[in-house]
Image (spheres, grey):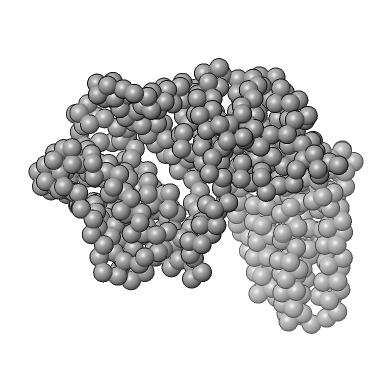
Amino acid sequence: MQPASGYALVAQVRARELRTRIGLGIFLALSAFAVAPSIWPGVWFATMCASQALDWLVFRPFRLNPQLQPSLAYRCLCLATSFCITLLYSATSAYFWFEGGLAGKLFAMLQVCGGLLHVSLHMHHARPLLLATVLPHASYLFGLPMLAAFNGEPGMGVMVVGGLLYCAHLAAAVKQTRATQDELRAAHAEADAERARAERASAAKSDFLATVSHEIRTPMNAVISGAELLRRTNLTSEQADHVGMLLDAGDVLMGVLNDVLDISKIEAGKMTLEAADLDLPAKLHGLVRLWEPRARDKGVAMTLHAAAGLPERARTDPLRLQQILFNLLSNAVKFTDAGSIALSAGRDGQRLWFEVRDTGCGMAPEIIERLFASFEQADAGTTRRYGGTGLGLTISRRLAELMGGDLTVSSTPGEGSTFRLELPFVAAAASADSGAGVGEAETAPASAAALKVLVAEDHEVNRRIVSLFLQPLGCTLTMVENGREALDLASVEAFDVILMDMQMPVMDGLDAARAIRQGGGPNAHAPIIALTANALDHHRTAWAGAGVETFLTKPVDPRALTAAVLAAGSARARLPDPETAAA
């Protein structure tokens, strides 16, 4: 906590330096005894320790409460204490002066000058305290030589003039120190203000992205889901091509949206990684199967090569590894019009490596230098010809670095490019097997027939989309338009699955889900699936806090929705019957 007054700041400084003052007091007492052995150095040290205890007690309220605003009486007490303690502390200079001969006089002046320097640098936060501690030292600095001059000792006038010159230099140094510290405080205040502005800007950006994500995903849900439903009908070849264009365009738009959200999370330091055992050959084959048809349509051959030593399984973040390789293969297909694309993988010691080599257009060295910068592409015509945001490679390299690896590129114009991803190799768990997955599959029902599903969704189009996806499965659907209606209905009727939107009028989905969980009704333990356009990480965290098991984002993936409903229905079937449990 920043002290509210100079007195409080001085109190903190004096508390930190207590041991230093005690140590210096021991040194002075021993030096005085060595110069002129007597009982007085010991008496002085004991009195000095007692005075430091008094100082500790007097300034203690400031240490307990740095925001304390001292009264006039308390300030006077602090000033009187500081004056007396400093006068006592510097009293050894008189002992040296009178008992130590010429060397003692020189030592006394050096001691007083050091004391003046010390208090000037540490007590200037409160000018009254500075004056109260400077005066005792100054009284010895000028008083002792002047007394000697009155007694006829030669050269004492020069010593007084030297003291004046020292004080002038000291005053200039203190003034400069104060100015420097004022500048530092101003710089810190400006930095704090800039940080606060940056935090507000970051929060505003997050809110903006959340709003944009929601507002884009909601209509895109209708576009993509409608196209998916249309594709399931009997279409002519021309109509099927048109639907395919809609779905491809939807995939591109969702890719752009996801890229922007990912780069924002990475820049904000909020990207999280998850470690899981991964079947590497299966993942690589899956990526090739995904991109090979598009490459074949362009007359480009795509191959996969697993180098010797590539482990069957490894522990990494499967989603992020797939995202990086997906981006690299996407670029390779995009920029290769003839020849071949090769995906290779292997292990080199404790490093896994993946390479995507193409025979595409290649890049010049000056283009490679800025290739991994945000929103950069090879040249101004790239976006017009190939599309894209220029974020894919930026995200891929950032993800590689977050995973402890790196992403590099080598390229020759007109001959092609090679992107190399290297990641740390972590062996998969020895007990990993596929038995758990088989068991889960066996417990899932073969169909969703007879499942009672409550759908809370305020948007009419979205309700119809869910209905068109789930009704053919045999589900019995009950539709409500807000969280309050869902809560009221869930409190009296048992459902196998509850689909819950997030942003709804009257009561939002989070509050409704939380109330259902805490209400103890027939659906307190029913599976709740969040089906929402709010797709950021903090939205997932909020749903988890409300007791929601599954999180699906719009646009709705019909396969993911079906799988989630089937799994939820299976989980509900293993729970005790609500009516039996209530009885």
Q: Position of residue 500 (x, y in %)?
A: 62, 30
Q: Position of residue 501 (x, y in %)?
A: 60, 28
Q: What residue is drawn where x is 83% and y is 66%? A: 48
Observer able to see residue 261? no
Residue closer to the observer: 82 or 391: 391
Q: What residue is drawn where x is 40% and y is 64%? A: 313
Q: Is residue 466 left or right of residue 70?
A: left
Q: Is residue 566 left or right of residue 131?
A: left
Instruction: Examine the image and state in which quarter residue 87 appears.
Output: bottom right
69 above or below 317? above
Viewport quadrant of the C terminus: top right
Q: Is residue 537 left or right of residue 252?
A: right
Instruction: Examine the image and state in which quarter residue 35 appears.
Output: bottom right
Viewport quadrant of the N terminus: top right
Q: What residue is drawn where x is 90% and y is 41%? A: 73
Numbered label tally: 0
Q: Position of residue 534 (x, y in %)?
A: 54, 31
Observer able to see residue 438? yes
Residue closer to the observer: 327 or 384: 327
Residue at the extreme top of the image, as rendered: 460
Q: What residue is drawn where x is 45% and y is 66%? A: 428
